[in-house]
Image: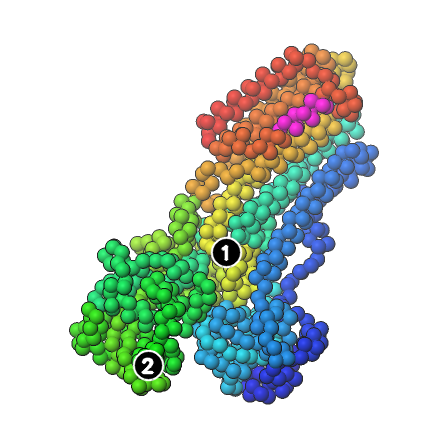
Amino acid sequence: MRNAPAWHTMHADDIIKALGSSHDGLAEAEARSRLAEHGFNELARKGKSNPLRLFLSQFGSFLVLLLAAAALFSFAIGHHIDGAVIVFIVFANGVLGFVQEHKAERAVESLKRMMAPKALVLRGGKRMLMQTKELVPGDIVILEEGSSVPADVRVISSVSMKLDESALTGESAPVKKHAAPCMDAPLAERACMAYMGTSVAYGRGRGIVVATGMGTEMGKIAVMVEGGTKKSTPLEEQLSRFGRSLGIMVMVICALVFVGGVLRSYEPLDMAMTGIALAVAAVPEGLPAVVTITLALGVQRMSRRKAIVRRLHAVETLGAVDVICTDKTGTLTENRMTVRRIWTDGMHVSVTGTGHSTEGEFHVMGKAINPEQHTGLMTLLRCAALCNNAEMHGEKPVGDPTEAALLVAAHKAMDVAKLKAHARRISEVPFSSDRKMMSALCKTPAGDAILFAKGAPEHLLKKCSRVLTRGRSEAMTEARRKDALDNATALAAGAFRVLALAYRPAPGLAEVNETEERDLTFLGMVGMMDPPRAEVMPSLQLCRQAGIRVVMVTGDHEETSKAIAKELGIFKDGDLVMTGAQMQSMSDAELTGMADRISVFARVSPSHKLRIVRVLKAKGHTVAMTGDGVNDAPALKRADIGVAMGIRGTDVAKEAADMVLADDNFSTVVAAVSEGRAIYDNIRKFVHFLLATNLGEVLIVALALLIGFRDPANPARMALPLTAMQLLWVNLLSDGLPAISLGVDPPAPDAMKRPPRRKHERMMDFPFAMDVAFTGILVSFAVLSLFAYGLDRGGTGKATTLALTALIVSEFAILQSIKQRYRIRLRSNRLLLASMAASLALQVAVVYDPALQSIFGTVALDVMDWAYMLAVVAFITVLLWVKGKLFR
């Protein structure tokens, strides 16, 4: 609401009155009226629906503008077919790019709709589940454990409610909420406010909506994030440089061919058209289409693998990444706390099973045991189940992650529903950060009251006077207390979150309070950990194989983070762990000097992520950064590739990111790296093919001008191996389906065994240029020899037909050579084989169809012509194969 008062300073009843609402909520008619006034409760997206701008953006590259100029010139001098062919290719490329980028935007919208949250709302005294976007100021929302806060809400009632505000403030610890005014507390300390994007970690409550959409705190941050500039990817920068260089070369070619031809007595108009045709042949009009198609296919493959790419070029950027900065919780790990160790009655018990699955066993010294045969273990698990506010909804626990883990562990040994029916809770003392423990009083059908407690070992042990040993309650000695604390320390050092459990019979007790938490019998301790995802280990191994360094960035404790990193192989001997506090005490120069040795950034807030990205980029790295919170957005925008979490990520993070992971899985990032490398290889193959074939065409015409071939039928007339129309025909076939088909080549077998390419590595390095030059020169000499042979055997018509056909067929040898360079078999790409067959069929039609002969100036070839031509092409193929074997 505009000019809204400071809601956190007002009493709940005064706010309800000010907003024209009631404890029963708004009337439906009033809610509809307010929705029309305030709009939907959603964050605005920059440039959300402007398809025209998106379409026009496809025609802004230098190469496309150059082609457009060539088309205009062709129309101006009356060569309408040539101009139409060029216009068609440019327009088709624009349509392809628009369709694919528009599909990517729609995929993101689909992802948002798929995850569209709903809120439990009170309207007219009735509870109803509705989409959060339909909330309006004055609505009463019901907040329950596990639910997201759908708008900015003033809390009006609370029952032990705690909120996870890490997405907004970066603080990982849940914050307690109450209904009392907060006076002039800053944002992070307003205990009576619940903000959009946060979630209820514990307890329940109610609140009244005071701000929606862009009026929320999250909306204000989204406005600031919108100001960032669009990043150029490595491929975009290289193609831009390539296009400018090629444009200069094309203009020089046009001038030289025209001047050289006129000096050699060729017709000026013929030489002008030949120069234009060569220029069009040298300009890779298929390049934008191939890049778009190749990237679009990569986007589609990634969407099937649970990733939504918001920009086509983001996939290629991932292929250049050499550092991945990743969250721990939910990305490398399952984001499900799991009990993995139990220490009770002197036994070290390992618990199998992962996540929320209630399937699992209890092992001692590597052997499975029956928990029912161990009194101490069963009593501890009963305590874990009863001193617990989590509940099973079907097969999934709902509640505080720690309590959910305890409940799942108990389910592995007993029927918890039956246990809770037998021991009904009648009173509890909730957990508090001061006491660091919780107590629950339960009563059996026989009337026996039992007090169960859990908490931090060092606190709970102070309240224990006895210990359960071999099924008997014995006195707690100092030696036993020290032994318990030593075991707690050992578990904590192993990255476990440790809780101690205790109980005492409480006959006659009807209500529990803090004073009753005494004379407890110590049962033992549980060690919990958020286990690594099963599929992460192979992905990390693939990263190491591919020369990619993975850096863990987490808000968790440094020892816990280090232990998980060691288990995953991220942290190795000699590596460093850096905390957020240590970062703050260091200068950028100091941090940059150490950056390559730091494997784990622990206890960092989202605001530290931006500095981490800046430091790594200063070292010359291409950086991918994952994130899910509002405060992660600046780092996601600054990284070379920002990756947002689709499940737990905020809308602001998703808008700032280049890619959204629908499964929050690190393995999906690694799959994108592999996809990016394959895409870059395929684009490089196309450029290689394009330059080799086009250089051959240019050299054929240039060398023919130098040699000065004469028409046998008219010695006074100069003869060229290829006419302007034939050059355009070759260009259409070579830059057409065969070249485009290279974009769907499978990944090279060694794609993830090579180190990442450097950020500013040139696409055309020296070996690449030498390969192109060798191929172009070889093809030009072969075609000119056939042209000379044709002049002797049948005149200019046969000579140009032989040269044209040989040039097209020799391109198949070039394709085989290029695929050999990447260790990919020719038959691995059926589309390429089909396109080669189609090109050959079209050329045969041009040679033998009378109508096409008149257009392209060709004549029919006999068997001897084909035999000689194929022998020459076979020679080219063998030489290229030998070159590939010797200089791979």
Which residue: 25% across, 76% down? Answer: 521
> Please, is residue 653 above or below residue 20 in the view?
above
Residue assigned mark 1: 663
What separation in Å lies between label 1 and label 2 (alpha carbons)?
49 Å
Q: Report the magenta residues as a range.
A: 836-846
Number of on-image labels = 2
Q: In the displayed structure, does residue 537 sit left or right of residue 525?
A: right
Task: Name the residue at the front extreme.
Answer: 446
Q: In the displayed structure, does residue 293 sit left or right of residue 442?
A: right
Q: Residues within 10 Å of mark 2 (few under 14, many from 20)?
A: few
Front residue of this view, candidates 43 and 788: 43
Which residue: 31% across, 58% down? Answer: 361
Residue 736 picture location, percent across and down? 66, 34
Q: Amino acid at mark 2?
A: Gly
Residue 52 picture location, percent across and down? 73, 54
Q: Residues within 10 Å of mark 1 (few under 14, many from 20)?
A: some
Front residue of this view, candidates 291 and 591: 291
Q: Secondary structure at mark 2?
A: loop
Residue assigned mark 2: 447
- Pair 1/2: label in front: 2
Its colouring scheme is rainbow
**Residue 555 seen:** yes
